[in-house]
Image (cartoon, rainbow, N blue to C red):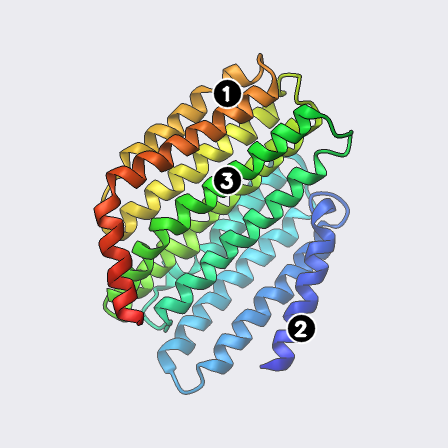
Amino acid sequence: MRIALIAAMAGLLVVSLCIPEAFDELGLLFAGAYGVVRAGQVVLLYIGGRENPALQRSTVGLGVSTTIGVAVLVAASFTDGALQGALWALALLLDMGGPAIFGVEGWTLAPRHFAERHGLIVIIALGESIVAIGAGADAGIDAGVVTAAALGIAIAGAQWWLYFDFVAQVAERRLSRATPGREQNSIARDSFSFIHLPMVAGIILVALGMKKALGHTEDPLELVPAVALLGGTALYLLAHVAFRWRNIHRFSTQRAIASLACLALIPLAVVVPALAIVAIAALLLAALIVYENQHFAELRDRLRHGTAAQTG
């Protein structure tokens, strides 16, 4: 298991080095290194499930979908343009869709640990987004940059708040209370393995928009950074809507409305100063947090006291 883990770590390092040129001359090397990472995961699961035939069967299914996905990535490395993009999308669909195709019955998980690990992924993404905000200030520091940076921290803090203050606790409790086996594994697959992808993508897009905004605080954003900043915020909030629906089958109307408001602001973002749009986005998220803190105060209090009683 240690050898497989070290090999996967080496492959992941090569993957990270290849990412800037993954769609160009380093595409084949990226696909090969990614294959090493995924193979390491499959090997670790297979070894860990030596005494669990159901887990080994699920691991074999994962290995099949992974192999096909990596093969498509290899094929994509010899193409370019729209065809390359389509092959990448197909590879991701086949690779990530493995558990949906081959079933989830054989997997075993520790609910609390599983939820915590995905929460840490969100924290890492938010931390990297703050680094990106700092990188956007390389043109010099003035009052506009300082204000935009502070607002960027407020946006990152709001993203953290919206996930960890309430949503993460509800999801962890729902996962823990689900019947082990198919029900619990399906929730884990859908809520965490799948729905967390657009959450993290939204955080990354917001970071991109913030980086561009800090470079030109007095000028309007270009279309791509505007879509990244506001569309990324909308994507993050919509992922939360899906996350809540999958866990407790309740629709978060206020977060859906906030996401639509972000999308509606995109035309404005290309005509007003970037600093103004950043401020509006921060105020919108702050208003959403204030509303939810007031509207769900009693429910949040019951959840926190219940969680404290269970863990105390």
Sooner in the amino-acid sequence: mark 3 or mark 1: 3
- Total of numbered circles in the picture? 3
Sooner in the amino-acid sequence: mark 2 or mark 3: 2
User: From what the image shows, is residue 215 above or below residue 107?
Assistant: above
**Residue 7: percent from left, percent from top:** 67, 73
- How far apart, in angstroms, are the residues tagged by discs 2 and 3? 30 Å
Q: Are marks 2 and 3 in contact (CB under 8 Å)?
A: no
Q: Tell me the kind of residue under disc 1.
A: Ile
Q: Tell me the kind of residue under disc 3.
A: Gly
The residue at the point 65 percent across, 38 percent down is: 133
For this rendering, which residue is in front, 6 or 93? 6
Q: Which residue in the structure is indicated by mark 2? A: 7
Q: Tell me the kind of residue under disc 2.
A: Ala
The residue at the point 40 percent across, 51 percent down is: 164
| Disc 1 secondary structure class | helix
**Residue 268: percent from left, percent from top:** 51, 15
Sooner in the amino-acid sequence: mark 2 or mark 1: 2
- How far apart, in angstroms, are the residues tagged by discs 3 and 1? 15 Å
| Disc 3 secondary structure class | helix
Q: Which residue in the structure is indicated by mark 1? A: 266
User: Does residue 186 appear to the left or right of 259 in the view shown?
Assistant: left
User: From what the image shows, is residue 300 above or below residue 134?
Assistant: below
* Badge number at residue 202: 3
The residue at the point 62 percent across, 48 percent down is: 128
- Image quadrant of residue 192? bottom left
